Amino acid sequence: MSETLSTFTPRDKADKITIVIADDHPLLRKAIRDILEKERDFEIVGEAGDGVEAIKSATELSPDVIIMDISMPNMDGLEATQKIKAMNPRIAILVLTVHSDDQYIVGILQAGAAGYLTKSVFGDELVQAVRGVVAGEMILSPTIGQRLLRQAARYPTKPVPLEAGEKLSTRELEVLKLAARGMSNKDIAKELGLSLRTVKGHLAETFSKLMVGSRTEAVITGLQAGFLTLDDIQ
């Protein structure tokens, strides 16, 4: 049976990353909360015990990040992610699960998750992953990321309706290709001789044009739409 949705009144959202924890194990939710609450720029605004409650949290709280398990009762994390991203693409979904099979990872990345971690991660890795998905970075190791993006490219999803004048600029495509190789915003800025702010701006514009909320979604969309190739993620 799922846990009752619990919400918390944010103290000061202005400079904080707001987070919802969605997992059907109360003890694990507490462990995650204990790790994240040590960070002064994090605010845990809610918890959910299943996918239905995760959607309710997303609707009512509009957090920056939802840490999402895959295997949950009533509605699993995959379906919940699809519905949340359709409703609010701005919310970053960070998957934290015991599953490490390609089929699970590809499926939920295609659904819109920005990152994928297994529950063997250490506390600091989780903290950095939360900050990474908020920054729009792809939270996958380079080896796993390339393998999974190759698989994801084989399974087309909905087409990207880029209107006239809304196609990616040469610079936006250049930034996206470097992001597809797993480079951080800082490394992309150094490689192209741009400011970090400019790189973030190009990625934000790219996400808007593609109607996605993360690098991972943007790269998968690019591969499926044909303006990125598998060579671009080498």
Image: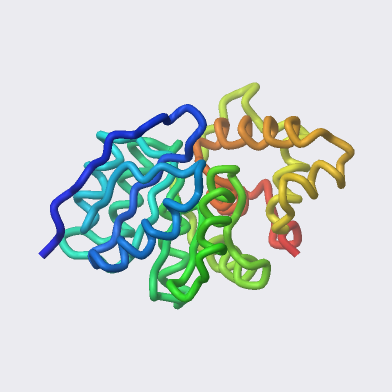
Residue at the image point whose x is 67% and y is 67% from the top = 142
Residue at the image point whose x is 65% and y is 30% from the top = 167
Q: Position of residue 145 (x, y in %)?
A: 61, 66
Image quadrant in which the N terminus is located: bottom left
Image quadrant in which the C terminus is located: bottom right
From this viewpoint, which residue is outermost toward the top?
165
Name the residue nearer the viewer: 129 or 93. Answer: 129
Q: Position of residue 161 (x, y in %)?
A: 51, 34
Q: Is residue 36 above or below residue 198?
A: below
Residue at the image point whose x is 56% and y is 52% from the top = 216
**Residue 148 placement, left or right of 50:** right
Name the residue nearer the viewer: 150 or 48. Answer: 48
Name the residue nearer the viewer: 19 or 73. Answer: 19
Residue 225 in view in this figure: no
Residue 5 in view in this figure: yes
Q: How is the image coloured?
A: rainbow
Q: Is residue 41 above or below residue 35?
A: above
Q: Position of residue 208 (x, y in %)?
A: 55, 31
Residue at the image point whose x is 49% and y is 55% from the top = 156
Counting every numbered tag in the picture gives 0
Name the residue nearer the viewer: 41 or 119. Answer: 41
Where residue 124 sits, quadrant-wise, is bottom right
Q: Position of residue 206 (x, y in %)?
A: 62, 35
**Residue 86 placement, left or right of 125:** left
From this viewpoint, which residue is outermost toward the left?
1
